[in-house]
Image (spheres, rainbow, N blue to C red):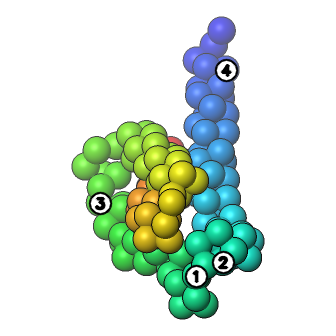
Amino acid sequence: MTQTAARKQGYTATVVAGCFAVLLAQVAYSLPGALNGTFQQEFQTTGAELTWITAAFAIPMVVFELTTGVIGDLFGRKRLLQAGALLTVAGSLVSCVAGTVQILWIGQAVSGRGSRFPEAGASTCSYR
């Protein structure tokens, strides 16, 4: 195998991993909005509490948007992508087993923090 063939294979794996990481982050962001009716029935929540389910995800994602690039520079893009995927899955699992709307907010906040990592890591890994 030539060096060019090995390099193309590495880029393909990076692009595929980045695509799946961004897909994970986008699904974690959009799914709770589609489940608002279920959350209202399950937790007997008000409209404001339902709004905070989505806001709990979006706020950490937006707040840490600028610092994520610096974190990637310090620890590496691959680690950033892996850590973000792990945080997103962990937060989604907390949200999945939540017994109260407050625990759901915590899970969403963890997912929101993690979702910023894969998107930033994937976008920068593809430029290498």
- In this rendering, the answer to whether 14 lies above or below 121 is above
- Which tag is nearer the camera, tag 1 or tag 4? 1
**Quick one: label 4 or label 2, which is nearer the N terminus?**
4
Labelled disc at residue 5: 4
- At mark 2, the secondary structure is helix
Residue in the foreground of this view, choosing between 37 and 63: 37
Crowding near the residue tagged with mark 4, few <14, some 14–19, many ≥20 C-alpha atoms within 10 Å: few
Q: Residue furthest left?
A: 74
Label 3 crowding class (10 Å Cα cut-off): few <14, some 14-19, many 20+?
few
Identified at 46% across, 47% down, the residue is 90
Cα–Cα span, label 4 and label 3 = 32 Å
Q: CA distance from mark 1 to mark 2?
A: 5 Å
First-in-chain label (4 vs 3): 4
* Numbered label tally: 4
Residue 47 is situated, as x and y percent measured from the top left of the image, at: 60, 90
The alpha-carbon separation of the residues under discs 1 and 4 comes to 55 Å
Can you identify the residue that label 2 sits on?
A: 40
Q: Nearer the viewer, mark 3 or mark 2?
A: 2
Look at label 1 and name its amino acid: Thr
Q: Which residue is mark 3?
A: 70
Between the residue at mark 4 and the residue at mark 2, the CA separation in whole angstroms equals: 53 Å
Q: Position of residue 28 (x, y in %)?
A: 61, 59
Do the residues under discs 1 and 2 have CB atoms within 8 angstroms? yes
Give the residue type that dot 3 points to.
Val
Image location of residue 45, percent across then percent down: 58, 82
Mark 3 and mark 2: span between their CA atoms? 39 Å
Would you name the residue on which mark 1 appears? Answer: 45
Residue 1, how many percent across, how many down? 65, 9
Which marked residue is nearer to the observer: mark 1 or mark 3? 1
Q: Quadrant of residue 9?
A: top right
Residue sitting nearer the eye, 53 or 13: 53
